[in-house]
Image (cartoon, rainbow, N blue to C red):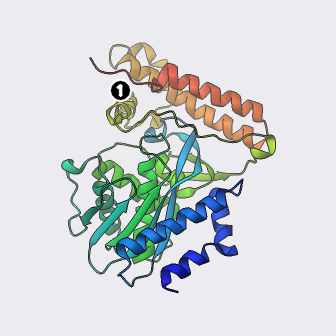
């Protein structure tokens, strides 16, 4: 057997099946489907790049769902998030030069030369920008970088709200770490590298929630108050209570809403600037509340409403976490509903109005 045949067969072994079960669960025929998916990706890599003798790695990063803390991370708030079993997966092998050849299912193949790591507005919003941005930040950190050949497939649909860009960024960071470094970069560093790529090279001013949830995995609560966020894993068996998180494909897309999303942190920060601060977390809630009469007319009304959401949402995250830790599921659900209502009424990001 050639090396691809050996790797393909090994996916049916007990060790590989146990790893797949950790990533995707074992309900129904999920393990059979994921095994076939991995095997098909190896077959694609053999077809597209098989002449290379370098070893092939299988590397994935999950999408994420935000449970609490809607749009608070960029103002150093608190969040509750969970990785999902939809992921971006690559079969990848190293190269001896700085070229990246990326063959992603459903898209045209692309090539990026990592000898050029400059951010360019002409690449904003593109996969090239993310590949270049991850490599740029890792090189700045003193890490080694290099080219690679990758076949990629993803079940995190672009624009679905599950953060396909973060999953891709975290995966690419893991690729550079595994192929050219020690492979043990901590998840916080992977998240920060990924955020840099999205902010600086991709042109989207996101907070750190998406990347942190994807890099950490599982169910986590994160406090972004400090530069080194406080991340605490949570364990709660929703299935034992008869519940599961269900991802519903609505047919909508976030792909063309970057400007709408960018307005949220910008408006919150306008309120913070009124108090001489860069983010709302540095403004005590009581100080904000006492100054409400003075804020009117100085900042947009929507910015004030979004600031109200920020403070209330931080409190809700604490209540959600406490409810799960104390097994008060109905209280948890009430906080989830309240978060959604606040996102509609105060944050105003449930739907986007087209410009005139």
Q: Position of residue 348 (x, y in %)?
A: 45, 23
Residue in the foreground of this view, choosing between 85 and 4: 4
- Judged from the image, the secondary structure of the residue bearing numbered disc 1 is helix
Name the residue at 33% across, 43% down: 204
Name the one closer to the observer, 86 or 38. Answer: 38
Residue 306 higher or lower than 3, as above or below = above
In the picture, measured across the screen, residue 41 lies left or right of residue 122, that is right
Q: Is residue 344 above or below residue 177?
A: above
242 left or right of 180 in image: right
The relative height of residue 250 versus residue 325 in the rendered view (above or below) is above
- Residue at 57% x, 34% y is 314
Residue 61 horizontal/vertical position (percent): 50, 58
Residue 3 appears in the figure: yes
- Residue situated in front as seen by the camera: 13 or 240: 13
Local packing at callout 1 (Cα closer than 10 Å; few below 14, some 14-19, many 20+) is some
How many dots with numbers?
1
Which quadrant of the structure image shows residue 252?
top left
Q: Quadrant of the C terminus?
A: top left
Q: Nearer the viewer, residue 256 or 260?
A: 256
Question: Image quadrant of residue 33?
Answer: bottom right
The answer to whether residue 23 is seen in the rendering is: no
Give the percent coordinates (x, y) of residue 181. 42, 76
x then y, percent, for residue 216: 56, 57
Residue 67 found in image quarter = top right
Q: Residue at x 43, y 68 (%)?
A: 44
Residue tagged by mark 1?
274
């Amino acid at each position: 057997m050639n090396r691809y045949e050996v790797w393909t067969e090994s996916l049916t072994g007990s060790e590989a099946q146990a790893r797949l079960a950790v990533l995707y669960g074992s309900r129904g025929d999920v393990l059979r489907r994921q095994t076939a998916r991995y095997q098909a990706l190896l077959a694609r890599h053999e077809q597209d790049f098989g002449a290379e003798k370098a070893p092939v790695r299988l590397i994935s990063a999950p999408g994420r769902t935000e449970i609490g803390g809607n749009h608070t991370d960029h103002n150093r708030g608190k969040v509750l998030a969970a990785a999902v079993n939809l992921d971006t997966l690559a079969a990848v092998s190293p190269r001896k030069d700085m070229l990246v050849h990326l063959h992603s299912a459903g898209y045209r193949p692309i090539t990026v030369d990592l000898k050029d790591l400059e951010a360019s507005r002409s690449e904003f919003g593109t996969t090239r920008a993310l590949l270049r941005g991850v490599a740029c930040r890792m090189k700045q950190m003193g890490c080694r970088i290099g080219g690679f050949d990758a076949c990629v497939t993803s079940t995190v649909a672009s624009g679905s709200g599950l953060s396909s860009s973060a999953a891709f960024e975290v995966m690419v960071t893991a690729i550079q770490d595994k192929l050219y470094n020690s492979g043990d970069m901590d998840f916080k560093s992977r998240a920060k590298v990924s955020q840099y790529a999205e902010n600086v090279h991709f042109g989207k001013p996101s907070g750190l929630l998406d990347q942190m949830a994807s890099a950490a995995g599982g169910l986590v609560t994160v406090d972004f108050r400090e530069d080194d966020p406080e991340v605490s894993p949570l364990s709660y068996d929703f299935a034992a209570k008869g519940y599961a998180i269900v991802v519903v494909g609505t047919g909508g897309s976030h792909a063309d809403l970057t400007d709408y999303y960018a307005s949220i942190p910008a408006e919150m920060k306008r309120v913070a600037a009124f108090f001489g601060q860069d983010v709302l977390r540095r403004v005590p809630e009581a100080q904000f509340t006492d100054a409400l009469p003075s804020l009117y007319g100085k900042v947009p009304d929507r910015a004030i409403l979004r600031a109200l959401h920020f403070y209330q949402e931080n409190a809700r995250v604490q209540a959600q976490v406490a409810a799960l830790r104390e097994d008060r599921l109905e209280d948890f659900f009430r906080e989830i509903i309240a978060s959604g209502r606040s996102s509609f009424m105060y944050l105003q990001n449930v739907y986007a109005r087209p410009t005139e």
